[in-house]
Amino acid sequence: MSRARTLARTGAAVVATALAGTVATSPDSSWYRSLDLPSWQPPKAAFPIVWTLLYADIAATTGIALDRLEKEGDDRGRRGLWTALGVNLALNAGWSALFFRAHRPGLAAIESALLTASSADLARRVSRSSPAAGRALAPYAVWTGFATVLSATISRRNRTRA
């Protein structure tokens, strides 16, 4: 597979995830606006900026690693990375559906913890093929870890509503 084709595939997967998450997200809903949110939550405008950068990072770094694995003839490693990426992106899009659509912040926090573990695993897998790409992907795991703490805090502060 050529580098451009790999990037097109990882990019398409990430764009599909971003679109699914965007469709499920409703920060202007009356339900969300009624939640007791912590003072340290980033401003609403920060989320699309951070996620756009992270999604580009995911597409590029996994693309680099997949191309390296192909060049090395590591079909098992490539399949494993594609699977890890698919699981990660499904968890990623699923958070928005659980939190904003189902109004289940507690479940969203648990799902976010799974996403954090998946993001760390994705960075680890990418690092095996390209240490530099793996380091570049590390902020994704850090951000999802922060999102887990934020989700759990929102859940705790709104227990009577969950």
Image (cartoon, rainbow, N blue to C red):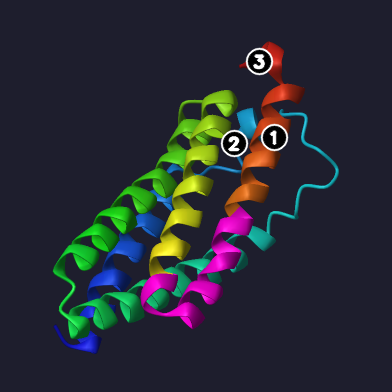
Q: Which mark is residue 149?
A: none
Answer few, some or many: residues within 10 Å of disc 2's Cα (few below 14, many 20 plus, some between 14 and 19).
few
Q: Reply above or below: 40 against 79.
A: above
Q: Is residue 93 magenta?
A: no
User: Residue 78 at x, y = what percent?
Assistant: 22, 67
Answer few, some or many: residues within 10 Å of disc 3's Cα (few below 14, many 20 plus, some between 14 and 19).
few
Task: From the image, tell me which residue sits under label 3.
Answer: 161
Q: Is residue 142 magenta?
A: yes
Q: Which residues are magenta?
A: 127-143
Q: Nearer the viewer, residue 153 or 68?
A: 68
Distance between the alpha carbons at the discs numbered 2 and 1:
6 Å
Disc 1 on helix, strand or loop?
helix
Residue appearing at x 33%, y 76% in the figure? 65
Distance between the alpha carbons at the discs numbered 3 and 1:
13 Å
In terms of sequence position, does the residue under pointer 3 or pointer 1 come before the other?
1
In the image, taking residue 117 as reference, residue 12 lies left or right, namely left
